[in-house]
Image (cartoon, grey):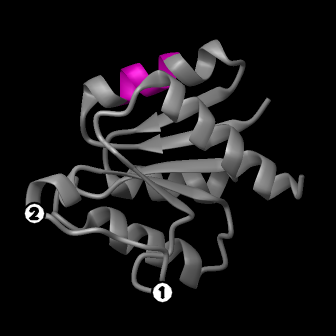
Amino acid sequence: MALIVIIDDDPDILESSSLVLKSKGHDVIISNNPNDGYKLVKTKRPDLVILDVMMDEPDDGFHLAQKFRREGVNTPILMYTSVSKAIGLDFDKSEIVPVDAFVEKPISPEELILKVEGLLKVKEGK
């Protein structure tokens, strides 16, 4: 199946997302901070990146997504957010937020699988 990198500072999210994705046959590598996550994406070249918006800083996820795109990393990015619930903002894909999809935390296992499979199909051109 696919190699997926999850970058999130919440150990519960890392564990639960990994378990769900591994149960569907995906290989999962996790990082609990943006610096190590960046290195993983650059060296492992995953099929999909799952990225949290807020880690050490409130906008770490946005900055990391922008950095990937500036450097030519075209891997699909699914962004976990609780920002829109917390402050009432909605985000769309743009140059400022160059990700392929957003999901609100907490996410159900079913929704996670649907989003991941959808993004992987787009990547494969299906």
Mark 1 touches mark 2? (CB < 8 Å):
no
Against 46, residue 73 (above or below) is below
Q: Secondary structure at mark 1?
A: loop
Which amino acid, mark 1? Glu
- In percent of width and height, residue 4 lies at 62, 39
Question: Are there few (<14), some (14-19), or many (20+) residues within 10 Å of tag 2?
Answer: few
Residue for point 22% across, 53% down: 55
Q: Quadrant of residue 76?
A: bottom right
User: Mostly what secondary structure, the magenta segment?
Assistant: helix
Asked whether residue 46 is in view, the answer is no
Asked whether residue 67 is in view, the answer is yes
- State left or right for residue 90 relative to residue 92: left
Position of the N terminus by quadrant: top right
Residue for point 52% across, 25% down: 110
Which residue bears the numbered disc 2?
87
Against 116, residue 98 (above or below) is below
Query: Which mark, residue 95?
Result: 1
Which amino acid, mark 2? Ile
Query: Which mark, residue 38?
Result: none
Against 97, residue 115 (above or below) is above
Q: Which residues are magenta?
A: 14-19
- Indicate whether residue 69 is drawn in magenta: no
Q: Quadrant of residue 60?
A: bottom left
- In percent of width and height, residue 104 lies at 32, 46
Alpha carbon of mark 1 to alpha carbon of mark 2: how far?
21 Å
